[in-house]
Image (cartoon, helix red, strand yellow):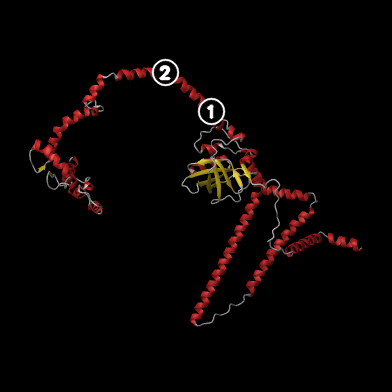
Amino acid sequence: MNDYFTRCRLAAFDPRALGALNRQESEYIAIAEKTLSASLEETSGFPIAQIGSRKALPLKEGINPAWIAPMSVFDARVVRPLLGDREEMVEDEWARISAAFAPYLDWQSAKAGGAVEKLGLDRVREILKSDHRVVIAALIAQDQALAPEFNNIDAVDKLIRCHRYLFTLLNNFVSFGDFYTRRSKAVFQAGTLYLDGRSFDLCVRVGDMVKHAALATLSRIYLVYCDCTRRGGTETMSIVAAVTGGDSDFLMVGRNGVFYDRLGADWDATIVRLVEHPISIRQAFWSPYKRIAKMIGNQITKMAAARDKAATDKASAGVAGAGQKVDAGKAPAPAAFDVGKFAGIFAAIGLALGAIGTAMAAVFTGVFKLAWWQIPILLAGLVLIISGPSMILAWLKLRQRNLAPILDANGWAVNARVRINVAFGASLTKVAALPEGAVRKLEDPFADKKSPWPGVILLIAALIVVLYLLNRQGLIGQWLSAIFG
């Protein structure tokens, strides 16, 4: 009723709100599609009656069907005794009724003993006459007398728990004894990941992968993040595995593996994120050559794709042009042979081959001028120039590998450096190896037959280069003169 009269005052303030105050037509359409109950409870949240500017509340006709029965009771028990028989009630009369019930509401809110009122007066008097309170007080006194004994039992229980679990906590949070001794898995190790022919023992569960990777990269460890799912179930989890052995050539997003948790349950694991750092000095030695080979392969692939596309486009254009000319009834004119253009191409090719040959001749000439023992030193120097920076950088980062950022990113308050050196890291990642006594069989019965001509051509080319260099030095003439006098 307060809602009704408040809406009527609002309608008097601004008639534009009248439509919204009486509920929208769409709300009636929504309930009209349902099977309505006899009491129309679906409209119980609507106003009691139609809203109007300063409109009186009808008591008999024009009432919301959901409120007809309650309004009939209200009219019979409240309105008629206080106001008499009438068809409607204005807001001032509703204020008089509310004021008449105000003392009762105040008494209800201030009344004590409401919790025991439901027991009834007889039951309350029975309880007050009984000695239950004395009995309960005596039981409480007995319990309080046993308080020292209970406190001792509680202290022994705490001591047993500390003896059983505190030592484990210290070995996994302070000294990391379980992690470094490798006698058992540390509490933060979630299990073992099998992937790319290796097993990774340092696996930690992760909540927010992006947030974890932002801090875990400070560990200077190559990290592999995987999403894991139980086959045939709906369980999922994310882990991060530390790669401390082998190489990273075939570690890429999308590769699959198997993860075994601490309980021995197997999970399907898929790589979803990588944080790259050096894995070993051996990998760092070969990484420049692998990058160069990958770059050359990519460039060759791009060039081949571009040439293939250009040839396809040219052929398509030629076919389209020929079709247009045939449709026009004219025979296509043959393209003129451009002698100058081809002569320029052959000249450019000759210059390029000549420059390459001159450069190779200069290199080989310089090499052959050296003493035989200087050539290995030269080759070692070239290798050192190429691989040295990568190896030095890897050596520095491997000395800085630290488990603490991985745990810190997971919410552990680790304030110490938990170093992982090369030897210890090798024990955390096991690379697949042949079983004892097994032998690799390298013979392929389906291998392609190798032609001897590439080797023969390469040998002839090497001999020609050597003879050319020896002739430039005048050694061949000296040898011939010495032989034939």
Residue at label 1?
A: 164
**Whole-percent x, y for residue 442 in the image:** 70, 55
From this view, report whether residue 301 is shown above or below residue 214: below
**Mark 2 vs 1, N-terminal side:** 2
User: Mark 2 and mark 1: span between their CA atoms?
Assistant: 27 Å
**Whole-percent x, y for residue 330 in the image:** 52, 82
Q: Which of 421/386 is in front?
A: 421
Quick one: which residue is furthest to the right in this view?
Answer: 485
**Whole-percent x, y for residue 235 in the image:** 47, 45
Residue in the picture at 66% in, 49% down: 286
Q: Which mark is residue 260?
A: none
Residue at label 2?
A: 146
Q: Is label 1 in a helix, a strand or a loop?
A: helix
From this view, report whether residue 66 is shown above or below residue 312: above
Give the image quarter of residue 110: top left
Q: Which of 100/67 is in front?
A: 67
**Whole-percent x, y for residue 387 in the image:** 67, 48
- Whether residue 92 is visible, yes or no, is no
Residue in the picture at 51% in, 80% down: 326
Q: Which of 197/366 is in front?
A: 197
Foreground mark, 2 or 1?
A: 2
Residues at circles 2 and 1 in contact by the CB criterion of under 8 Å: no
Q: Is label 2 in a helix, a strand or a loop?
A: loop
What amino acid is labelled 1 in the image? Arg
Q: Quadrant of the C terminus?
A: bottom right
